[in-house]
Image (cartoon, rainbow, N blue to C red):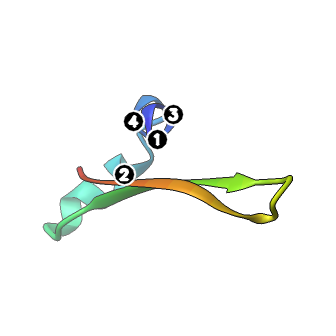
Amino acid sequence: MARLKERRYADKYRSLGRPIYLVAVEFSGEARNLAAFEVEEG
């Protein structure tokens, strides 16, 4: 999540006037599955 905010990926969509959600997803290479996720309204 910190990287999404640091790199300001959502900034180009802010002018659209719609809700923005930041979604951080972590995948496990060992289990080859979703390990964790975090959602935040930005």
Contact? badges 1 and 4 (CB < 8 Å): yes
Callouts 4 and 3 close, C-beta under 8 Å: yes
Label 1: which secondary element = helix
* Amino acid on which disc 1 is placed: Leu
Mark sitting on residue 10: 2
Crowd tier of the residue under label 1, counting other residues whose Cα lies within 10 Å: few below 14, some 14–19, many 20 or above: few
Task: Name which of mark 1 and mark 2 comes first in the sequence.
Answer: 1
Residue 27 versus residue 33 in the image, above or below: above
The residues bearing labels 4 and 3 have C-alpha atoms spaced at a distance of 5 Å
Whether 24 is drawn above or below 18: the answer is: above
Towards the viewer: 16 or 30: 30
Instruction: Evaluate whether residue 18 shows in this view.
Output: yes
Residue 36 image position (x, y, % from top left): 54, 53
**Pointers 1 and 2 in contact (CB under 8 A)?**
yes
Whether residues under marks 3 and 1 lie with C-beta atoms below 8 angstroms apart, the answer is yes
Tell me the number on the disc at residue 4. Answer: 1
Q: Which mark is residue 5?
A: 4
Q: Residues within 10 Å of mark 3 (few under 14, many from 20)?
A: few
The residue shown at (44%, 31%) is: 2
